[in-house]
Amino acid sequence: MHLPPLNRPPEKPMDTDIDPQLVPPLLRLRGISKRFSGVRALDRVDLDVRAGELHVLFGENGAGKSTLINLVSGTFPPDEGTFHFAGDAIHNFTPQRARAIGISPVFQEFSLVPSLTVEENLFLGREVARSGVLRSGQMRKRARALIDELGFDLDPSRRVDDLSRAHQQMAEIAKALLGKIRLLILDEPTASLTERETGRLFELIARLKSQNVGLIYVSHRMREIRALADRVTVLRDGRHIRTLDAATSTDGELVELMTGRKIDLLFPTIAHEPDKLMVDIENLTLTDGSVCDVSLHARAGEITGIAGLVGCGKSELIRAIYGIEPTASGTIRIDGAPYESPAPRRSLKRGIAYFPANRIAEGLALSRSIRENASMTVLDLPAFARFGILRQAVERTRIAGIMAQLQLRPPNIERPAGALSGGNRQKVMLGRALTRELTVFLFDEPSVGIDVGAKLEVYEFMKRLVEAGAAVIVVSSELPEVLALSNRLYVMHHGRIAAELTGAEKTEQNVLSSFFRDHLTAEVA
Amino acid sequence: MSDLELSVAAQETGREKLLPARWLWSAILPIAMVVLVLGFASFDRGVLSSANLLNVAQQTSYLALFAMAQTVVILTRGLDLALGPTVSMVSVGTALAMAGAAATGHDPSAVLLAGLAVGFSLGVACGLFNGVVIAMFKVNPFVATLGSYNVAIGVATTLSSGRPVQGVPTLFSQIFYGGSVFGIPAAIAVTVAVGIVLHLVLARTVFGRSLYIIGTNPRAAAVAGLPVKRILITTYVLCSALAALGAIMMTARTGSGEPNLGGALSLQAIAGAVIGGTSLAGGRGGVGTAVLGALFITILSNGMNLTRVDGYVQMVVLGAIVIIGVLLDRLRLERRL
């Protein structure tokens, strides 16, 4: 492996006000802030990573972990704050400069080119060549040596798109370790590795630490944090909460710091009256494997929640019920009747509505009017169109009435949907729920991208639906939301149901423990 | 909540500021046309003669028909490169059918019916093929219609052995070229009628509404339960049927089935649609944009003919016009007008 001999930063002349005991950290961030189109992703965050230390970033989805590691990798610059690496102030940072000074990231989204082989990917942009001619023999030898040393079961001559996700993850790690490296960033690296491969990775991490490489490690898995971390920095809502020594902190303390949000939202009190079985799923598996052997049911008159981390398959599950993710096996019953090969049009006819998480991509035709967007799902009904001819007067009055009821501001339904704020866009989507007879409502991350006021209106809307006897399924990565809204809560993990919680069991602690429970059996299988 | 209201208010004022710009954008083409006409007229007074103006109107009506056909598919983010060869194929097929029916001694009305039936069937078949390949097999419209472009050229050339098909009955030309409705020449009358019907279809029917929604956001259309595949297939059939109608009108004008009739029409129809303001990104445009674009291109080529601009230079100009049209479309999208 081409790990560099430790290049310590040149010792600075001794400053009188600096404790001579203190070794300057490898990475030193101070007051880092970053905004994305008005949303503050990072708010004056400090972070120190020492050479030879494994530093865990811990926080919920959206806490700012990804933004922070992207900043450190040079993906985008901070809006404010200072960035020191090995004692030098860094400006105009880019991914190329990051690599040049020895910062090497391994992201969850792979940076491999699918049509190239593993070794071509390893040397992408730093090919070994003499007078313009590639020295593939030498590159192959070095690639093999590296992969052997890592102990990965990976053939460097295979094309990346022929590899499994686990093998792609190995190639990604190998790529990050090729060349000079002083700070390694790992973003949930074990997510697709088997136990054995995880073990090799941990050995490798230990070796890197002994060679004085600093590591930033993002993970939700308590067991890994316990096994690896020197220090843990907890982020919440884009802010630095606390940095703790891993050895002296408890799991409970970490989880509490991670979730200890101020109560900034009041949820409506919903009178759940579970009644008829409306959605009954047995052993459902999707073709892409994102949902595996899931059984679940939802009743009229209650909100059924599904919690889980991003990528656990919870969205895919309700999308499959609506008919936009293909199913491989299992049965779906709606109101007692089997529902085979679901499709959006037929779902709507059966009374099932789906509200997508990504309203821009899957919900709205932004340059079209609010009216057209709200009536999009009812063009098949005689009330809105007879013999294929639109009844525009009816459409105008119906949609205007619905939008007034939802308090769309301003109430002009002829404006393009693209001119609306996130909350008002969600109202246009909700308007669709009132245009036709529906009995099952599937909400995918209903409050994503909308402000607090609009969130409350969405919750009130669900309350009215349920109290009027509808079956509502809410999928959400925001734990407080799904805990407060649901009468029964499923927790999904790795495509399977990890827990079903009702009544007093429905607590944040219980949900989190199902997230973080070690799924040794699932992973080995 | 105040934040939200502020941001909405900001967007409102932003839109109001753009409003004059929006007027300017839609005025560009009419202004350009007036400038062109005056410019050509300064070279040749004949440009403004009533005979030439009627000629321009007739020419425009054919191209407008094809530009409308093209607009319908462009609205769904599609394209029909095969439109020109479809016109050639329909022309040859119609002429062959009528010549054959006349030769076997059928009466004149049966001969006309045979011609129309064969012509429209060929058009519909072509559209069905394009639509199925694009909607069901998810082939890129450019590639799919480039394929059928060659197929249609091959069929037209083979059926006609590459020569004009004679034997088109004079009655056919008398009706579809020489005929008139309330003194309006047949070609103009047909195009006006088709334009009105198509406008109503786009504005007032579920099908028309669906075209705009699919073109604006195909994914959202599918999630909202619109029958996207069925609508796409119908769209390509409609496009080719309109092309067949145009082919029949043009065959009546030439009096023979012409295997080269559609030569440059694919590009001209696309140019007409795009110059008129139909967005290649889908979801924007209509009968108005198609007619306006067709008128612009006809005025341009008519003026260039009268002022004796070389034919090959004219091709260069047409190509440049398409590129300018697409650039304008980009600018419009970037400014979100």
Image (tube, coloured by chain):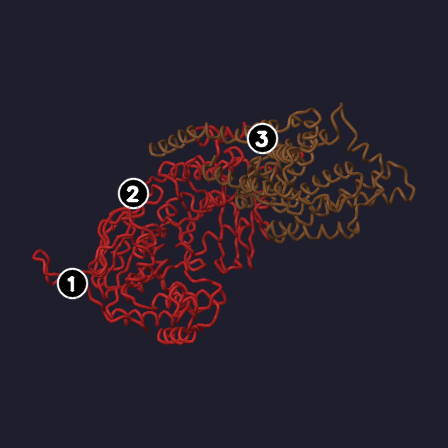
Chain colours: A red, B brown
Pointer 2 chain: A
Going by the numbered disc 2, the residue's amino acid type is Ile
* Count of marks placed on residues: 3
Local SS, label 3: helix
Where on the picture, by quarter, is residue A389?
Answer: top right
Query: What x and y, as percent, mark residue B63?
Result: 67, 36
Q: Nearer the viewer, mark 1 or mark 2?
A: 1
Q: Is residue A382 visible?
A: no
Kindly identify which residue carries mark 3.
B36
For mark 2, what is the residue?
A: A263
Q: Residue at x 43, y 70 (%)?
A: A133
Alpha carbons under labels 3 and 2: distance apart: 68 Å
Above or below for A251 versus A337 = below
Q: Depth check: B270 or A47 in front?
A: B270
Identify the chain of the residue marked 3, using the numbered disc in the image: B
Judged left or right of residue A305, residue A47 is: left
Q: Which mark is residue A23?
A: 1
> Nearest the camera: A420 or B277?
B277
Res A512 seen here: yes
Mark 2, Cα crowd under 10 Å, few <14 / some 14-19 / many 20+, is few
Cα separation between marks 1 and 3? 77 Å
Report if the CB atoms under discs 1 and 2 are less than 8 Å apart: no
Task: Mark 1 vs mark 3: tell me if same chain.
Answer: no
Q: Are marks 3 and 2 in contact (CB under 8 Å)?
A: no
Q: Nearer the viewer, mark 1 or mark 3?
A: 3
Tell me the element at label 1.
Answer: loop
Q: Earlier in the sequence, mark 1 or mark 2?
A: 1
Secondary structure at badge 2 equals loop
Label 1 neighbour load within 10 Å: few <14, some 14-19, many 20+: few
Instruction: Verify CB contact (< 8 Å) between mark 1 and mark 3.
Output: no
- The verdict on a common chain for dots 3 and 2 is no
